[in-house]
């Protein structure tokens, strides 16, 4: 199918899964985690079972089909590599298939179609002389949460700090973008901000192919997450989706959804042993019928979100509802949902989404998040005061009094990341105070070792047994990470400062890197965007660019296209999605926002500690 370049990627994803379902009849279906996450947002397993699938299982070397099954459908949500092929071979060897269909959902990284077919045919032909293998390229790797936002789950584990070791990640990112360009049949320009993004477009420069001169154009702005860590560690985000991600656990094996465990799957007493194992998590992903709730979570304030939900629920209610209540609370929404109308198939997706929102707003951790918000705002004001040089002393005191304030070390580490991310090179951090802070953090690690989350003890401290030396070394490593964050924008000509203070009588306001950049990209004045490194699509464009410089005409601009993609490598927050939507709403072209995952403050902290 030739996709319209002006269509949202959700249309491509929905079509792709409907296409996959055509091959599910009488087949044992195997999905990797990334394909499963995409399916989770585009119909769920119900889609495959309705299409006639016999079973749906995880793609694993330890899985096999029923010995009587002769058809299989293998769906891969990442570029096909050696490890994927090895797992597929194990599944085929463990089973008794005669017909095999293989869906490459994100193209190929180290394999060609012909080579893959030959490898799989060897296994099938050894069991059945008339066995067949079909390899298909269907773009199912995108997980679309709304018409404007898509995620690429197979890139979710990219570390945020990579020291000149891009080889393991650049080919995967490039293969993902190429897969999008190929299915859209478009020309493209890349614009890059940050070292990893620059490595990706240098890769494109070396491997680019000549594109159809008459095809449409898609421009991509690639942004490294590390250039603005404040946006994903800020507890004061006004985006409701960010608050939900802070307060609720992730849906198992996903980077895009949350889960609320409510009740056992089976209620019958004779299944008591199963009751203890299987539970149904409520989540935000709709299965039976699309709803606007996720889009509201991204674009509305909490007050407007609750008002829109109440209006929608009251319209569906079978009985009268009082409309004079001024304050909308989770209890009020839960009371409305008790109406039998919301137990129908038409309303069940809306019901579970609203219950997820209510669970977040009733979370026992809400008070801690609100305290972290206030501390973050106070520190931001202190940073903006040029005379205040003891900001690190204040943070050290927070660590020492954390138990009295009921603050966790996780929250305090996030606040430190905010602090070092928002300042620029003009603000000098005293080396003496940084050493003192390092000692305080090390002592805190040692004292609270048994309460630390696994990712801190494993990835940062690297020791299962608490020792003061290991904790001090971890603190030293953390301070080194903070200094890297502080220098992440030092070479930029623009957007080095992420907070604005017009005069001493006005509070300082955080202004994200993405917001400042996109405001300028969409400005009618088209200011010079020196921060963007650009790669042209071909030699013709390169010659045109050189000619433009000679005659002093306007150079290329990100908006000179039919479809603009803003892609943040390393994760994105809901507030950033909202900022991009606001900046681009009047730009006149389709704008899609992409990233490798959604990030809560704690997940952002975890990503900083991941080893390359």
Image (tube, rainbow, N blue to C red):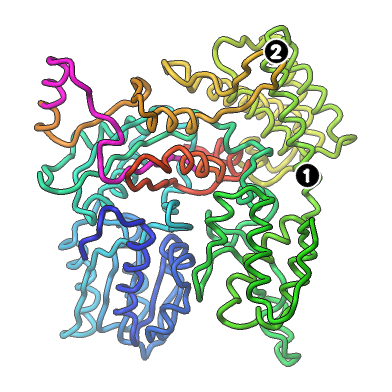
Question: Disc 1 on helix, strand or loop?
Answer: helix
- Quadrant of the drawing holding the N terminus: bottom left
Residue interval drawn in magenta: 544-571
- For residue 281, say whether it is visible: no
Q: Check if mark 1's residue and mark 2's residue have beta carbons within 8 Å.
A: no
Establish if 218 lies above or below 34.
above
Establish if 266 lies above or below 189.
below
- Of the image marks 1 and 2, the number of the one nearer the N terminus: 1
Q: Residue at the far top: name it.
A: 387
- For residue 406, say whether it is visible: yes
Establish if 127 lies above or below 480.
below
x, y percentage for residue 335?
78, 71
Q: Is residue 563 magenta?
A: yes
Residue that mark 1 sits on: 451
- Which numbered mark, 1 or 2, is in the foreground of this view? 2
Residue that mark 2 sits on: 504
* 270 vs 235, nearest the viewer: 235
x, y percentage for residue 165?
38, 32
Where residue 436 sits, quadrant-wise, is: top right
């Amino acid at each position: 199918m030739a996709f319209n370049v002006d269509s949202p990627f959700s249309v491509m994803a929905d079509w792709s899964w409907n296409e996959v379902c055509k091959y599910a009849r009488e087949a044992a279906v195997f999905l990797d985690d990334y394909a499963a996450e995409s399916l989770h947002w585009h119909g769920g397993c119900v889609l495959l079972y309705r299409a006639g699938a016999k079973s749906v299982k995880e793609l694993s070397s330890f899985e096999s089909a029923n010995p009587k099954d002769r058809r299989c459908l293998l769906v891969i949500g990442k570029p096909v590599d050696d490890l994927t092929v090895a797992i597929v071979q194990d599944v085929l060897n463990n089973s008794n298939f005669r017909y095999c269909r293989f869906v490459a959902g994100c193209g190929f990284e180290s394999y060609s179609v012909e080579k893959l077919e030959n490898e799989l045919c060897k296994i099938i032909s050894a069991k059945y002389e008339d066995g067949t293998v079909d390899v298909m390229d269907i773009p199912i790797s995108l997980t679309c949460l709304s018409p404007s936002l898509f995620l690429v789950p197979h890139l979710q584990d990219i570390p945020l700090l990579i020291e000149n070791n891009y080889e393991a990640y650049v080919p995967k990112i490039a293969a993902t973008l190429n897969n999008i360009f190929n299915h859209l049949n478009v020309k493209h320009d890349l614009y890059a901000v940050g070292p990893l993004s620059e490595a990706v477009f240098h890769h494109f420069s070396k491997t680019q192919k000549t594109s159809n001169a008459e095809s449409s154009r898609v421009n991509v702005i690639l942004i490294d997450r590390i250039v603005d860590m404040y946006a994903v560690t800020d507890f004061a985000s006004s985006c409701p989706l960010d608050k939900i991600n802070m307060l609720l656990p992730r849906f198992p094996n996903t980077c895009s959804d949350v889960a609320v465990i409510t009740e056992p799957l089976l209620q019958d007493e004779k299944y008591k042993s199963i009751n203890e194992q299987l539970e149904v998590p409520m989540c935000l992903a709709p299965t039976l019928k699309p709803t606007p709730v996720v889009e509201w979570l991204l674009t509305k304030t909490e007050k407007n979100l609750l008002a829109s939900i109440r209006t929608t629920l009251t319209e569906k209610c079978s009985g009268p509802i009082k409309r004079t209540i001024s304050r909308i609370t989770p209890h009020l929404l839960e009371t409305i949902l008790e109406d039998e109308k919301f137990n129908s198939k038409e309303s069940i997706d809306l019901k579970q989404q609203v219950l997820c929102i209510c669970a977040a707003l009733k979370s026992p951790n809400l008070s801690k998040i609100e305290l972290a918000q206030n501390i973050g705002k106070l520190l931001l004001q202190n940073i903006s005061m040029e005379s205040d040089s003891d900001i690190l002393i204040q943070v050290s005191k927070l660590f020492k009094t954390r138990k009295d304030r009921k603050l966790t070390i996780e929250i305090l580490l996030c606040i430190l990341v905010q602090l070092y991310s928002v300042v620029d090179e003009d603000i000098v951090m005293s080396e003496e105070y940084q050493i003192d802070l390092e000692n305080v953090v090390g002592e805190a690690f040692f004292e609270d070792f048994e309460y630390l989350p696994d990712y801190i003890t494993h990835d940062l401290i690297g020791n299962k047994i608490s020792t003061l030396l290991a904790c001090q070394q971890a603190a030293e490593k953390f301070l080194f990470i903070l200094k890297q964050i502080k220098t992440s924008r030092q070479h930029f000509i623009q957007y080095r400062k992420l907070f604005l203070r017009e005069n001493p009588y006005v509070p300082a306001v955080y202004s994200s890197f993405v917001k400042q950049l996109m405001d300028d990209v969409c400005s009618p004045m088209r200011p010079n965007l020196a921060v963007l490194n650009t790669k042209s699509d071909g030699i013709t464009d390169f010659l045109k660019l050189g000619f433009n410089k000679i005659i002093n005409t306007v150079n290329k601009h990100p908006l000179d296209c039919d479809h603009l993609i803003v892609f943040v490598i390393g994760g994105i927050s809901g507030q950033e999605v909202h900022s991009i939507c606001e900046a681009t709403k009047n730009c006149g072209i389709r704008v899609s926002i992409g990233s490798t995952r959604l990030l809560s403050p704690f997940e952002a902290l975890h990503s900083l500690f991941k080893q390359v």
